[in-house]
Image: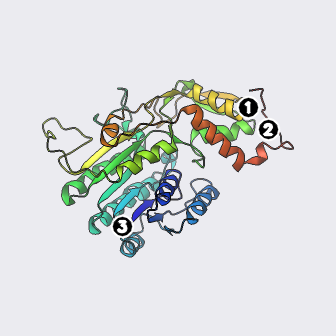
């Protein structure tokens, strides 16, 4: 039995669905909070509910007794922890949400894994942990001690807590630092989704750092492929780990951290142009300075993941954005009907 937390979230839904399609028994947990449009979460939940081998519990990770009940009821062998309070900018306004979900909730996950003899915990970290680092590409072998947002700090704390449990209780843990995941049924707080909403409504899009941004945009199917390949590849500890020259991405304990990204950073302006092409509309752009908590560029070194499970992304930006826009047009037909012609139609 595999537990997927955040199963009504973007990555969680796709990961759970892939496992269900492979015939696995999957338990899903989500608290359906209102951080963004609850209807999107319900749409994802309904999609998973069509599978007979899916078992859902609407609970919060920070609810210890409810979590204990789920672990006792189901014989959980693998946990894929994708439930968390997401978003960098929101963490500036509501740090309490991040402490409760990303630290208290994650500590509950670790305790459940410890007491129920879970064979492998795979958990979501984030590329945001690289914070003030400038060396590119970002490598999990680099130190990440200078986060620039509370969200990043909570994700770094997850890695530290995971190592402690790997050391103390021999719990195999694998952390995944995601790099700007996008795709159909995605998160509306992400730039690509917000851009699409504003473009079809004829509103200006906010382009931060005057457009001088690079992101390692990673299509959802590639992310899920990496996760699924890792399930049977639980770390066992590196006997050659050097305590005098410690590699923070690995350990003598059964602990590992990997980047999972596209390994091909794209400029924000090129990304916008690709979105414009597929929408058939031109964006009005409002250029703004860098926002607190943001970083200028992300670029993933994925060598360790390739070595561990042969992971290599295959989806181009053009293909991925095309699939997102196809879904977007189907989900929001009112923007594209003949009677409701988009306000900002161009001749692309």
Count of marks overlaid on the render? 3
Is residue 78 visible in the rendered image? The answer is yes
Residue that label 1 marks: 281
Measuring from the top left, give residue 149's x and y in whole percent: 43, 41
Local crowd size for mark 2, using a 10 Å CA cut-off: few (<14), some (14–19), many (≥20): some
Q: Is residue 145 visible?
A: no
| Residue sitting farthest toward the right | 339
Direction from residue 182 to residue 61 in the image, left or right: left
- Side of 157 where 54 appears, left or right: right
Residue at the spot 23% in from the left edge and 55% down from the top edge: 166
Residue found 27% across the figure and 35% down from its top: 141
**Rendered position, 342 above or below 5:** above
Dots 1, 2 in contact, CB < 8 A: yes
Indicate which disc, 1 or 2, sits on the residue closer to the N terminus: 1
In the rendered image, residue 89, in percent from the top left (x then y), is placed at: 51, 43
**Circle 2 residue:** 342
* Image x and y of residue 34, in percent: 58, 58
* Nearest to the observer: residue 146 or residue 314: 314
Disc 3 vs disc 2: Cβ atoms closer than 8 Å?
no
Determine the CA span between mark 1 and mark 2.
8 Å
C-alpha distance separating marks 1 and 3: 47 Å
User: Which element carries disc 2, helix, strand or loop?
Assistant: loop
């Amino acid at each position: 039995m595999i537990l997927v937390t955040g199963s009504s979230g973007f990555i969680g839904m796709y990961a759970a669905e892939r496992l269900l399609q492979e015939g696995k028994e999957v338990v899903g947990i989500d608290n359906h909070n209102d951080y963004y449009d609850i209807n999107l979460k319900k749409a994802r939940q309904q999609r998973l509910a069509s599978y007979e081998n899916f078992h859902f519990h609407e609970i919060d990770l920070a609810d210890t007794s409810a979590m204990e009940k789920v672990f006792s009821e189901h014989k959980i062998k693998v946990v894929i922890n994708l439930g968390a309070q997401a978003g960098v900018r929101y963490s500036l306004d509501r740090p309490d949400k991040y402490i409760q979900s990303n630290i208290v909730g994650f500590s509950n996950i670790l305790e459940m894994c410890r007491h129920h003899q879970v064979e492998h915990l795979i958990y979501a970290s984030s590329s945001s942990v690289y914070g003030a680092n400038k060396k590119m590409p970002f490598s999990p072998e680099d130190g990440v001690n200078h986060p620039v947002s509370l969200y990043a700090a909570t994700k770094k704390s997850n890695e530290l807590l995971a190592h402690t449990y790997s050391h103390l209780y021999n719990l195999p843990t694998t952390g995944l630092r995601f790099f700007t995941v996008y795709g159909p049924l995605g998160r509306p707080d992400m730039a690509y989704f917000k851009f699409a909403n504003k473009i079809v409504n004829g509103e200006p899009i906010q382009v931060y750092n005057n457009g001088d941004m690079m992101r390692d945009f990673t299509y959802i199917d590639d992310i899920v492929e990496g996760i699924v390949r890792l399930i049977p590849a639980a770390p066992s500890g590196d006997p050659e780990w050097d305590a005098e020259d410690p590699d923070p991405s690995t350990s003598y304990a059964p602990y590992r951290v990997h980047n999972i990204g596209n390994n091909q950073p794209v400029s924000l302006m090129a990304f916008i142009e690709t979105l414009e092409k597929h929408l058939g509309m031109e964006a009005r752009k409002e250029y703004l300075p860098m926002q607190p908590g943001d970083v200028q560029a992300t670029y993933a070194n994925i060598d360790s993941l390739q070595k561990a499970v042969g992971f290599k992304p295959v989806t181009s930006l053009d293909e991925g954005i095309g699939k997102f826009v196809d879904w977007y047009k189907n989900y929001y037909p009112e923007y594209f009907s003949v009677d409701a012609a988009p306000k900002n139609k161009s001749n692309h």
